[in-house]
Image: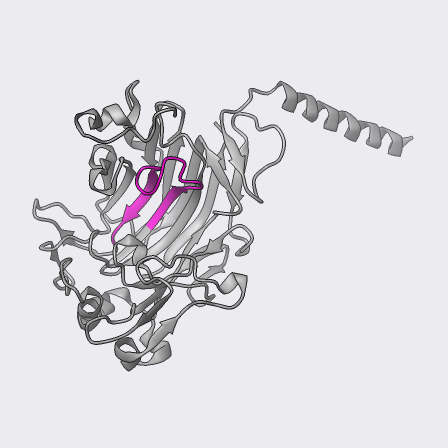
Amino acid sequence: MKNLLTILSLVFELVSKSNQKLLCPESLTTVSGTSAPKGRICSGDLIFQDNFETFNLDVWQHEQTLGGGGNWEFQWYTNNRTISYVDEEILKIKPRLLADDTGESFLYSGTLDINGGSPSDECTNPAWYGCSRTGSPQTVINPIKSARIRTLNSFRFKYGELEARIKIPSGDWLWPALWLLPRNNQYGGWPSSGEIDIMESRGNKDLIDSTGKNIGSKLASSTLHWGPSTLMNKYTKTHYEQSSYEGFDQEWHIYQMVWTPDNITFKIDNQTIGTASPPEGGFWEMGDFSNTNMVNPWRGGSKMAPFDQEFYIVLNLAVGGTSFFPDGANNSGGQKPWSNKSPRASGDFWEGRNQWLPTWKMGTDDQTLKIDYVKVWAL
């Protein structure tokens, strides 16, 4: 009798939960991918969670490219457990010097071909000479190995609330980021289909721009990128910043985004730092593009277009490049060893390592991007 009562109790509980699911407010969120929840989604449901008890490569796919992300960054994104790994339930991305593996002369004369033979070893982005490079004194091979991981195949979503607990790295010219990219480029190539940067920062302790503002590890930013062409990217209208007296590299912080059919709000530690709310005419009106000869790529979409499609999650640690670190900024660890206009920026960076490498403190975890968890709730 006791067993029968237990079974009946379990059946009742299952039926009750099923009825609750049927009666719950239907979510505006959509999801897809191998790790996306199946069936009806209710408002407030936790639809994605990784606490990094292990490093699940079915959830996180590594990008493998030398391309530099369109900014001629100095890292080689690769899949290697000495660089991206889980340690004590913390995901870590720890940059390494390529010369430690190959010797320094390889950077100036070797050929690095990352066209692997198996699906997991394939080069993921051939743009900007991303799959093969040959070093020379003028074109030094990417001197840093790092990682960029994404949920391209496993989890995409539209509308919802994302939260991640992160500690950014310390070290000159390190560039950590948590961001979202569109799965299908519904409205065309970048930036027409949008980009959502939830967290970006710089590892420099004291990097002071021309206005006197510290733009190093004491500053974190969130940005939407959008526009009908690369030359009409109106990200400055949707760029938000938050400062920290100690520095975001000194403590763990929670980076958040709330994405609705009306706006996108960015928060740090539950404090709003900015909200992008387009008018009824959408981002086309917000960008004042009607005064150009461009055709509206978002016609037919909602007022949130291009941010009305499913996006996937990206985590990465970039290094340097020719856009994110401004020329002329004063840096306490030594002046920037390359110019953004230099044809051999990567080589100038590498040859200035006596200045920046000590700030990385390679015998520690200081230069490591650390992620405690990533969670997404349905709207």
Report if residue 277 is visible in the image. Answer: no
Quadrant hosting residue 12:
top right
Name above or below for residue 161 compared with residue 336: above
Residue 365 lies, in percent from the top left, at 36, 63
Report if residue 25 is visible in the image. Answer: yes
Q: How many marks?
A: 0
- The answer to whether residue 23 is left or right of residue 144 is right
Residue placed most toward the observer, 128 or 36: 128
Name above or below for residue 326 compared with residue 236: below
- The answer to whether residue 311 is left or right of residue 272 is right
Q: Which residues, given as a range, are shown in magenta?
A: 177-202
Q: Is residue 375 magenta?
A: no
Quadrant hosting residue 230:
top left
Residue placed most toward the observer, 193 or 347: 193
Residue 319 lies, in percent from the top left, at 28, 59
State the scheme by which the image is colored: one colour
Q: Is residue 195 magenta?
A: yes
User: Where is the N terminus found, in terms of image quarters?
Assistant: top right
Residue 266 lies, in percent from the top left, at 33, 34
Residue 252 lies, in percent from the top left, at 36, 48
- The answer to whether residue 41 is left or right of residue 141 is right
Name above or below for residue 83 compared with residue 192: below
- The answer to whether residue 246 is left or right of residue 132 is left
Residue placed most toward the observer, 358 or 328: 328
Residue placed most toward the observer, 163 or 146: 146
Q: Residue furthest right?
A: 1
